[in-house]
Amino acid sequence: MSEVLHSVDDVFGVSRDVPLNYVDREMVDGKFIQSLTRSHHIVIFGSSKQGKTCLRKHCLNEDDYITVACHNRWSLGELHAAILKRAGYEVKQSTSQAVGGHFKLAASAGGDIKLPLVGKLEATADGEYEKTGETVETKVTLELDPLDANDIIRALAEIGFSKFVAIEDFHYLPDETQRDFSFALKTFHEQSKISFIITGVWREQNRLIAFNGDLTERVFSVDVDRWTAEDLGRVIEEGERLLNVSFDEAFKKELLADCNESVHLVQEACRRACRDAEIFKTADDQRDVGSADLARALLKQIVGEQSGRYNGFIMNFADGFQQTELEMPKWIIYAILISSIEDLEKGIRLRELTRMIRDRHPRGAKLNQGNITQALGSATSLQGEKGIRPIVIDYDGTNRNLHVVDKSFLIWLALQDREDLIEDLDLPELDVT
């Protein structure tokens, strides 16, 4: 038995902290740690709830970075202002205007920030004055152009900032802001030692490089999505050791076979299995837990609890930003619902998506593919607008693939009567004449 008592919820399940049964993966943790030493920007990407934030928290101390959580309406200037605030600045809008006509920022450093007051004079015994190098609490106010990365670099240098900047939920930013910040990253790389750790829910490896080709060799990407059966098995085994329990082999086999490589589902199923067995902390004597039937039931239960959210995603996304003649978001949902789970796991190619939509859309073959591409490009922002968090789908514009980035959604979808879901979309009847 473990000499230390651990709570089931601290070992399995979702928590704010890194779970105690966290396991290193060489192709993930090893690559991330190696990238940290190279003074480059790092992009951590993958499906939702696959361990992106845990990776950063596990490999870095809390004092090594500041964290900025993105909002879906932020401009580049607002993102830059948020970075300054997290670094310790008080930021207000200035009355001065930049060359582009937008207002500058008045950034004041003070409070908890201690700055060296260079040139302070003190009288010596013989009446002369000499400079001291004291560190004192002082106030520095800068006027900055919020769109100019050089000004942000200057402000951070002024306070001796040397931490990593972790940008969470980058995918929620408007496309224009993502693109603008991708250009700013090149300046940060060339003009400073500041490194960013950017976290996003998507499946394409080089999204930022697609926005700005100059980031090639300046950005390293770490894919957290792939959890092998061996990796997930180690997660379970580490939890068994910490809680002094032994999951039935049939339970583990069924869970690993049906979890769709989702570490979140594995963690949550193990947590519930323990609680169902009235195990809430490390057991005094080893306890046997689970069965194949229990694994199947728990997976169905977990994804079933998301039915409201997934039904809401289907209907809210289908409604689009507003009513339009082509109703492209509705037809994207239609294409998802008629696709096989296997195809959704791989990603639907734009060509295939277009074919499926044209086969039933009132405009048929005359439907412009550009209308479909435009709607796909707005998929993430539409989900943000509708309050769909975490997002369910994402479009890879580089490889022209539509991906489901919520693994639980695929399991849920496999259990649904898709004909009913399609009927709820209220699509026009096929013209069979």
Image: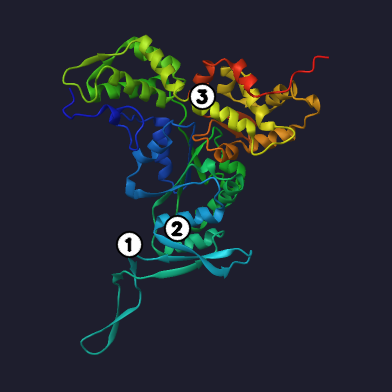
Q: Which residue is depicted at the point 62% across and 22% down?
A: 424
- Of circles 3 and 1, the one toward us is 3
Q: Position of residue 258 (x, y in %)?
A: 45, 16
In the image, taking residue 5 as reference, residue 70 lies left or right, namely right
Question: Which residue lies under the disc numbered 3?
Answer: 409
- Please state which amino acid type lies under the numbered disc 1: Asp
Give the answer, above or below, for where 14 lies relative to 76: above
- Please state which amino acid type lies under the numbered disc 3: Phe
Numbered badge on residue 112: 1
- Of circles 3 and 2, the one toward us is 3
Q: CA distance from mark 3 to mark 1?
A: 45 Å
Q: Which residue is depicted at the point 80% across and 25% down?
A: 365
Give the answer, above or below, for where 276 lies relative to 354: above
Q: Position of residue 45 (x, y in %)?
A: 49, 36
Q: Quadrant of residue 206?
A: top right
Q: Which residue is depicted at the point 39% across and 35% down?
A: 30
Give the answer, above or below, for where 192 lies relative to 385: below
Q: Residues within 10 Å of mark 1 (few under 14, many from 20)?
A: few
Mark 2: which secondary structure?
Answer: helix
Question: Which residue lies under the disc numbered 2?
Answer: 84
Q: Position of residue 421 (x, y in %)?
A: 60, 20
For the residues bearing labels 3 and 1, Cβ distance under 8 angstroms: no
- Please state which amino acid type lies under the numbered disc 2: Leu
Q: Residues within 10 Å of mark 3 (few under 14, many from 20)?
A: some
